[in-house]
Image (spheres, grey):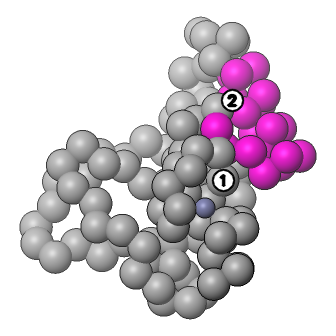
């Protein structure tokens, strides 16, 4: 569900995940989710992830590289994000050029 417009975006199932854009970009979430039934959710907190990068400095550098690409180019392709609207790789629905032409 898109936060500002309350627009339904996508139904998530079994192995789906959400929040990856906010996780990698450092930006606030632009969408939220509501469960229809009881749901098991696994959460990865960014501060926990960053703590593990003490042992894996290359992972921390990769996180910074991804974050920089998203902030400077609005390019989410490095994390495999596809637009929920047009399903093309690299941008999110709020940045979708097709969304604004309709
Ligand atoms: Zn799109």
Density class for disc 2 (Cα within 10 Å; few <14, some 14-19, many ≥20) is: some
Check the image and name the residue furthest to the left.
Answer: 38
Can residue 29 be seen here? The reply is: no
Q: Which residue occupies 65% across, 45% down?
A: 90
Judging by the rendered image, the residue that carries numbered circle 2 is 63
Quadrant assignment, res 68:
top right
In the image, residue 29 lies at what x, y percent? 59, 65
Check the image and name the residue furthest to the right.
Answer: 72
Q: Is mark 1 within 8 Å of ligand 1?
A: yes
Check the image and report above or below for 94 versus 55: below
Quadrant showing the C terminus: bottom right
- SS for tag 1? loop
User: Residue 91 got which mark?
Assistant: 1
In the image, is residue 73 part of the stretch drawn in magenta?
yes
In the image, residue 14 lies at what x, y percent? 18, 49
**What stretch of residues is rendered in magenta?**
60-77
């Amino acid at each position: 569900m898109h936060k500002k417009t309350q627009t339904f975006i996508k139904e998530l199932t079994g192995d789906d995940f959400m929040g990856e854009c906010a996780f990698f970009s450092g930006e606030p979430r632009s969408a939220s989710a509501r469960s229809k039934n009881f749901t098991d959710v696994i959460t990865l907190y960014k501060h926990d992830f960053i703590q593990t990068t003490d042992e894996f400095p290359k992972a921390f550098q990769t996180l910074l590289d991804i974050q920089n690409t998203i902030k400077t180019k609005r390019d989410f392709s490095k994390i495999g994000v596809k637009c929920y609207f047009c399903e093309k790789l690299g941008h999110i629905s709020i940045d979708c050029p097709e969304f604004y032409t309709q």
